Amino acid sequence: MPVPAETAAKFGEVTLPQGVQVLGTDTDSGRDTRYRLALQMTDTQLREFLPQFPETPEKSEIPKSTPVIAGPALSSAPDPLYAQDQIITTDHGTVTREVIVDQRAPDEVYVHLSLYTT
C-alpha cells in the first residue's frame, strides 16, 4: 500500500534530501511493520543523505536478489552497495534500517530503503 514518503522516512528517523525524486513507497504489517522507499537522487543528494547512517554502504551481493518497488531491478545493478543498522525510536522501539545504493551513472543514483521493526 503506497504511503507518503515523509511518513515512511519519519518511521526510520531518516531525512530525505531536498528535491529527491520519490519513485515509490509501500508499507505492510503483520507481526512487524515495514516501510519501503525507492528514491532517485543526484551524487550531491547522496552525499547529503548517507551521513545519517553510522555505516557507509559497501559492496555486497545481497542486494542483487532484493526485489525493488520502483526503479531498475537490482539484478542489473553494476555495483550495489549495502548497509544495515538499528536505531531505538521513541514511537516504534527498535527499527532496522537497510539502505541499498545503486549508482547507474553520474547523478543517476537509485536508493532503496527498508525500514522495519524487529
Image (cartoon, grey):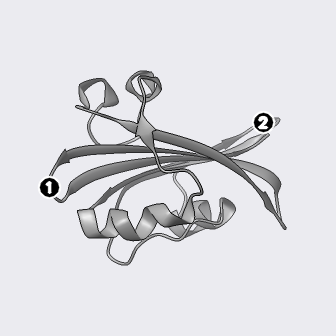
Q: Is there any visible trace of residue 56 in the rendered image? A: yes
Judge by depth and name the residue closer to the eye, 66 or 25.
66
Q: Which mark is residue 61?
A: none
**What residue appears at the point 44 percent right and 66 percent down from the top-left corner?**
49
**Marker count (numbered):** 2
The residue that label 1 is drawn on is 106
In this rendered view, identify the residue nearer to me: 61 or 112.
Answer: 61
Q: Where is residue 24? Give x, y as percent.
A: 41, 51
Task: Please report contact status of discs 1 and 2: CB closer than 8 Å, yes or no.
Answer: no
Q: 72 left or right of 59?
A: left
- Comes first in the chain, label 1 or label 2: 2
User: What residue is at 60 percent from the left and 57 percent from the top?
Assistant: 54
Determine the residue positioned at 46% across, 61% down: 50
As shown in the figure, which amino acid type bears the numbered disc 2?
Gly
Which mark's residue is nearer the viewer, 1 or 2?
Answer: 1
In the rendered view, does 34 fall on the left or right side of 56?
right
Query: Percent position (x, y) of residue 96?
Result: 69, 46
The quadrant where residue 77 appears: top left
Q: Amino acid at mark 1?
A: Pro
Instruction: Kindly identify which residue carries mark 2.
Output: 30
**Nearer-the-camera pick, 67 or 63:** 63
Question: Badge 1: few (under 14), some or many (20 or more) residues near its Cα, within 10 Å?
Answer: few
Give the residue at x 51% y 52%.
2
Cα–Cα gap, marks 1 and 2: 39 Å
